Image (spheres, rainbow, N blue to C red):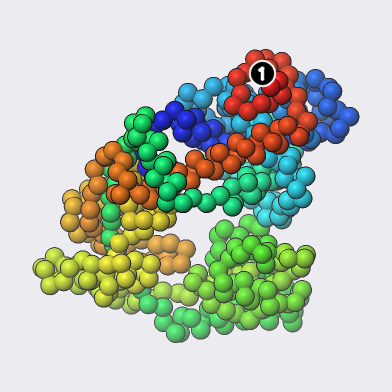
Amino acid sequence: MLLKQNNSKFINKLTLSVIFTAIMTLGFSQEIIKDEERKADVLRVKDTSGRIKADGVAAVVGDFIVLDSDVDRRTAQIKAAGGDLGNITRCELFGSILEEKLYAHQAIQDSIVVNELQIRSQIDQQIQGILGEFGGSMDRMLEFYKKDSEDALREEIYEINKNQSLASQMRDKVIKEVEITPEEVRQFYNDLKEDGLPTFGTELQISNIVVIPEVTEASKQKAIDRLKGFKKDVEENGASFTTKVLFFTEDTGSKSTGGLYTLNRKRPRMVKEFRDVAFSLQEGEISEPFESPYGYHIILLEKIRGQEYDVRHILIRPEITPDAIEEAQKKIEDVRAKILDGSISFADAAREFSDEKETKFEGGQMINPVTQDFNFELTKMDPDIYGQVQALKDGEVSEIIQDGDRENPIKFKIMMVTNRINEHEADFSRDYLKIKRLALQDKHFDAIGKWQKETIESTYIKINGEYRDCEFSGNWLKNK
């Protein structure tokens, strides 16, 4: 929701949250130092060519350091990735870097662990994304990050990912138990009224009817037989499972890592069908083919490490025949014609004909995945959805749209804007869920502030140079 006006207390907290989120997404400056290095004002680092470089230490937070160059580099990286720091000052950005280090340091003290294989598996995708910012030039990218080789950059990204994961888990731990009552929501709303209520931007309620081509039993059996063949070739002929992944899997997300995923029994990650099979295997065992919402799989269980299971998998999607596609398209055309001639309402047609389980029984009403209600803010709408409804008048039925996703690579749909909520000042009854989210977010900020205050007092922190003149929201200088 777009907040046109709000009280200063909440805006300050929101600003700090935005900075922290930007850093967690884009930062590339995590270093760990030993106890005996804490008194040094200059960090001497030997790079891969053996040369010695110097960079001033702007701050020490526990076992972590912040270099003089970190703030400049962080600013450049956020801008290079399309981020906008707005009115955020250099001191505010530096303060959020300190906050990030504090989270990571305390996470280590609390024995929070990270999934190293999962972190390393993200690096290829990150490298490709960063390369895009430099027109595909590895040399330009290495020059920007002041690295002499791709391997050196990969290792730095690994350390960054690891420490950002620690910081994120620590932050989640701090706010995990925070809840809010209806009375607290009411009090939060009344407090907002004193300084002026926020204005929520224009929102749309959107309905759709989706028709998915039916997969034939013959296509399903063909996919199963292919997977059985892969399994047999690995078990009987010694073929490489990883090679099979690289040549045949249709899971583009894991193809570059040889189909590797790490599952944790205590932290569900994959769909239930996948987890149930993976956790039933012995090390070195390959599963029989099984079905999930994404298609058919086989899994190789490589290693069990306590609660963590390292698995590789191959995904094959059953072929969708031209006849099935033609039949689905004809069905959606007929449904649209019935709505247009008044034979049936859009909502009733969705209940009767739509194949999308998530919206079918709500008369086709789409649910905002962020807010979990039916409202989509115009300025924050998914670009694909926005492109599909931007030209529609209220109550108008769209043309037939061919779409696709991970579960259904081909599907047909029609859409309608069923309600338009114009920009308006917050109303307690009408906007209760939005106000509740803001109130809970405010409690999260308060919990984080309390945790930071206590943790800063118990952690070794030293701020050097010009940054001692900053006015921090926390007592980083320990002068109070």
x 52%, y 43%: residue: 443
Tell me if residue 387 can be seen: no
Image check: 166 left or right of 25?
right
Residue closer to the observer: 450 or 139: 450
Image quadrant where one finds the N terminus:
top left
Tell me if residue 94 can be seen: yes
x 37%, y 29%: residue: 195
Residue closer to the observer: 325 or 114: 114
Please state which amino acid type lies under the numbered disc 1. Answer: Tyr
Give the image location of residue 186, x and y in percent: 39, 45
Image check: 172 left or right of 394?
right
Mark 1 surroundings within 10 Å by alpha-carbon count, few (fewer than 14), some (14 through 19), many (20 or more): some
Residue closer to the observer: 228 or 170: 170
Image quadrant where one finds the C terminus:
top right
x 28%, y 54%: residue: 205
- Residue found at the very far right of the displayed protein: 36
Badge 1 marks a residue whose secondary structure is helix
Q: What residue does disc 1 label?
A: 467
